[in-house]
Amino acid sequence: MPGREERKHRYTTVSIPVTLYNRIKELIKDTGFTSVSSFVTYVLREVVADMEREKMESETISEEEKKRILERLKALGYL
């Protein structure tokens, strides 16, 4: 079984259009990004984190919904 350090640096390949690659390459000149891959990884981490946050928020039951559920359970005799 690979150690934690080995698993941390595993990668896969994702294809993007050459024109987009070139646009990103131009965009990151004189920035802290050392490669198009590092920029794309940064952007995707941000997007994925935002989407996960939105998903969690949409799955959370509001206090109003919780109150209605409890009232319905009481009316049905479960509480």
Image (cartoon, rainbow, N blue to C red):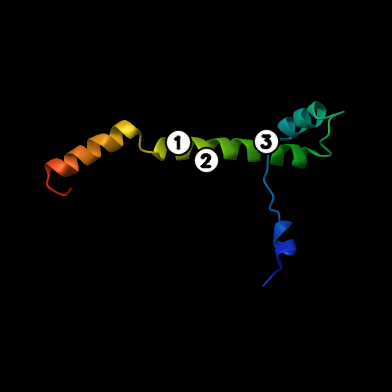
- State the image coordinates of residue 30 (x, y, percent, origin top left): 87, 28
Q: How many marks?
A: 3
Quadrant of the drawing holding the N terminus? bottom right
Q: What secondary structure is found at the residue carrying circle 3?
A: helix
Residue where numbered disc 2 is placed? 52
Q: Is residue 79 above or below residue 4?
A: above
Mark 3 burial class by Cα count in 10 Å: few <14, some 14-19, many 20+? few
Q: Is residue 25 left or right of residue 66?
A: right
- At x 24%, y 39%, the residue is 69
Observer-side mark, 3 or 1, equals 1
Q: What secondary structure is found at the residue carrying circle 1?
A: helix
Q: Is residue 26 above or below residue 58?
A: above
- State the image coordinates of residue 14 (x, y, percent, origin top left): 67, 46
Amino acid at circle 2: Glu
- At x 74%, y 62%, the residue is 5
Q: Is residue 42 left or right of residue 78?
A: right
Residue where numbered disc 3 is placed? 43
